[in-house]
Amino acid sequence: MRARSRLSVLWRDRAGRFSALKTATLVAVTLPALLLALRWSFVGLGARPLNAAIHEVGLWGLRLLLLSLAISPARAVFGWARGLLIRRMLGLAAASYIAAHFTLYALDQRFQPLHIGHEIVHRVYLAIGFAALLGLAALAATSTDAMIRRLRRRWKQLHRLVYAVAVLGLLHGLMQAKSDITQPAILVGFFAWEMLFRALPARRQSASAVLFALALAAAVATAGLEAGWYAAATNLPWRRVLDANLMPVLYGPRPSAWVGMVALAVALLATANTFISRRGRAGPSAPEPAPLRG
């Protein structure tokens, strides 16, 4: 009975009422794992299904982590305070996916702890990923209300480590992707947007002009990072990568285009939200008085 009451916090708010938002979030964060399992069972995941599952689960962990970091910008730009209700759930879901990512890797290594430890020590990208896993585990373990009360001010200081964890996780994803970094590069672009947004003064964060400039800056940063990664880590011609970013009609949308489009959509929605709010505060205009008739 107690276990059932503890589980009910997944779909109830702090007052104990049913929360449609939390329930929808719970379904949304569970769906990728369910769909992956169904694909694996009925369609297959290619020649190396376990390896494909490891990568897919890891990407979803990073996506959910960045979604949890997007709650603060959503609150600042759109006034969406209810997002705080699901931020913890998104963070814990991210930690669960990253833990599953490591578990599947351990399964691929036949659960040989000495061999796994040797690989982590001698492969840089595995060491970086394992450090991100440990950091995320610490954040998940201290995300309860009891730990918030116990740690007090130190809790905020500890949970600022989420930015370092995100950097390590994204770097691990880039290094693991090797020759095709499309998906990790998109996530790095979104993370760049989130960090640039947090660097803005609070009074400027919801300004439309600033958000449009931020969209451009995030797209340019993503294109530069993608080209720079190919230049530093592979033998692929980085100039062609930059050309592809400038000619999406010929090469298809690159990561910078996806980041730019999403950031542009945020700027447009913020502009529309500001316009509607101002119209609502102004109220309907008063009717003109009828002319006097003598």
Image (cartoon, rainbow, N blue to C red):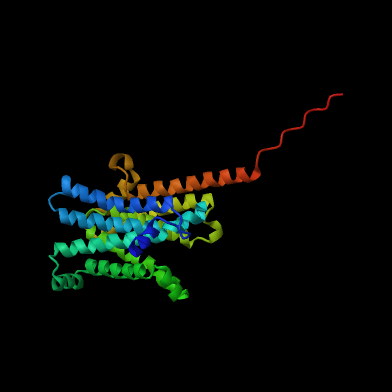
Residue extending furthest toward the top: 294
Q: Closest to the observer: 25 or 125?
A: 25
Residue extending furthest toward the right: 294
- Up-down relation of residue 156 to residue 21 (above or below): below
Q: Position of residue 19 (x, y in %)?
A: 43, 53
Task: Residue 5: tell me if it is visible.
Answer: yes
Q: How many marks?
A: 0
**Which image quarter is the N terminus in?**
bottom left
Q: Is residue 281 left or right of residue 230?
A: right
Q: Position of residue 82 (x, y in %)?
A: 48, 55
Q: Position of residue 34 (x, y in %)?
A: 25, 51
Residue extending furthest toward the front: 1
Task: Residue 43: tell me if it is visible.
Answer: no
Which residue: 19% across, 69% down? 123
**Which image quarter is the C terminus in?**
top right
Q: Closest to the observer: 231 or 142?
A: 142
Q: Closest to the observer: 278 or 207?
A: 278
Q: Closest to the observer: 226 or 159?
A: 159
Q: Is residue 209 left or right of residue 9?
A: right
Res 231 quadrant in image = bottom left
Which residue: 34% across, 71% down? 138
- Up-down relation of residue 241 to residue 153 (above or below): above
Res 222 quadrant in image = bottom left
Q: Position of residue 210 (x, y in %)?
A: 51, 53
